[in-house]
Amino acid sequence: MDVSVFGTGYVGLVQAAALADVGHRVLCVDVDTHKINQLRQGVPPISEPGLSELLEDNIREGRLSFSTQASDAVSHAELIFIAVGTPPDEDGSADLSHVLDVTRQITELMEGDRTLIVKSTVPVGTADQVLVLARDELQRLGKAQLQVRVVSNPEFLKEGSALADCMRPDRIIVGTRDAVAHDQLAELYAPFCRNHEKLMFMDNRSAELTKYAANAMLATRISFMNELANLSERLGADIEAVRKGIGSDPRIGYHFIYPGCGFGGSCFPKDIKALLHTAEHSGMPLRLLQSVNDVNDQQRQVPFAKLKQRLGGQLAGKSIALWGLAFKPNTDDMREAPSRYLMEALWAEGATVRAYDPEAMDECRRLYGYRDDLQLCATRDDTLQDADALVICTEWKNFRVVDFTLLASKLRERVIIDGRNLYNPEHVAAHGLLYSGIGLRQVTPPVGAP
């Protein structure tokens, strides 16, 4: 099938590559000329394992192409994905201006029937709004005889494994009551349903709410575990033992019950605020979800508070090694990352940060530029030079095995704040280090430790 995609961000680009890889002919359009030129060379603007190879293969085979012209996209295909950004407004609501602008562009350029597939994460009722706008525009332009169909097709991609999520989805949610659109989406996604049927058809509003509900549930599990972790410390319990104990219950499982320094990224924080705004506007506030959001806001401050306590309340003039800048491993995304809250708090206290991340160094430089209190280091161990303490914000694999003897010799205050519970407290303490995790019992280095 011929498919067009408006937007080459995370969602649009990954979806386009996956569709092209199963044989569809996909054209992506974006207003960013530099990005499009890079994509034509097979260079993605994001860090996602396997994406560059998939782009190169499908560009070479002629199944994936890129343009800056909206007219190319509208003429190319009857099926048009809308995968543009929906950034939060000041009140937390989703800004739909890009979605609506693309809708206007498409209707202005339509010369035949089109099916608009809203892939962007949007509030409940957006598909109805897009349909009304498109029909009004067609009427205004004297093209009322053309048919426009609007489908809600939310994404469920995890950064770092987005391609796998796209190629082998758990489910594909499609919101439509239109028979033609139903058949089109069934044909489009048939290659992804060879082993078993993954398509779930429902009405538009239910599809839109399913996306928010899924992220709200996962965020709730994270905040719940973070609150339990803080309580565990207070009571002298071990949250890792508790996690394993409850995770072994098949009704609970182990997914998203790892305590840490708060969730970040492009989805959870934004989607929770958008759902809270929608609920408030509907006259039915979501008290539980508001608490989930509040707990996360507080959890982001925990590494800083632990560090300040360990260093006697004095951070001015201190040099802090920081491992991990991205909000999670296998991505360079720093949106709402715990590292940002930590760095900005340290700078406000007069401390210097020496940071390393396998993927997010360029993104950090783009966000913060060149400043005297930020050194981006070439390796993990380079951050330890003249550092007073170490803080870990991201659970990258290459942080899991370390030389604690080296850490003890390099860190002037011998302090480690582990926001991801990567190490065994007794083992770390045996090397004479003062180690604080999230929800772990404090272990004092034994007498005679190096």
Image (cartoon, helix red, strand yellow):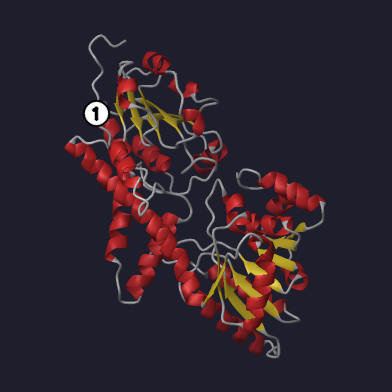
Q: Is residue 436 left or right of residue 390?
A: left
Of all residues shown, which one is farthest toward the left?
235
Q: Quadrant of residue 404?
A: top left
- Where is the N terminus found, in terms of image quarters? bottom right
- Tell which of 367 and 383 is nearer to you: 383
- The quadrant of the rendering that contains the C terminus is top left
- Tell me residue 92's x, y (percent): 39, 63
Q: Residue at x 77, y 48 (%)?
A: 57
Q: Residues within 10 Å of mark 1 (few under 14, many from 20)?
A: some
Residue 11 vertical position relative to residue 203 in the rendered view, above or below: above
Q: Is residue 89 visible?
A: no
Q: Which residue is drawn at the image coordinates 38% and 40% (left, top)?
A: 344
107 relative position to 25: left or right = left
Along the horizontal axis of the image, is 176 left or right of 449? right
Mark 1, secondary structure of its residue: loop
Depth check: give the residue in front, 448 or 92.
448
Badge 1 amino acid: Gln
Residue at 39%, 37% in the rendered image: 343
Residue at which label 1 appears: 442
Return the x and y of residue 376 as percentages of the image width and height: 51, 30
Q: Nearer the viewer, residue 251 or 267?
A: 251
Q: Give coordinates of residue 437: x percent, y percent.
A: 31, 33
* Image position of 249 with respect to 78: above or below: above
In the rendered image, residue 218, in percent from the top left (x then y), is placed at: 40, 55
**Above or below, comparing residue 51 to residue 442 in the picture:** below
Please tell me which residue is depicted at 68% across the width and 52% down the height of the picture: 35
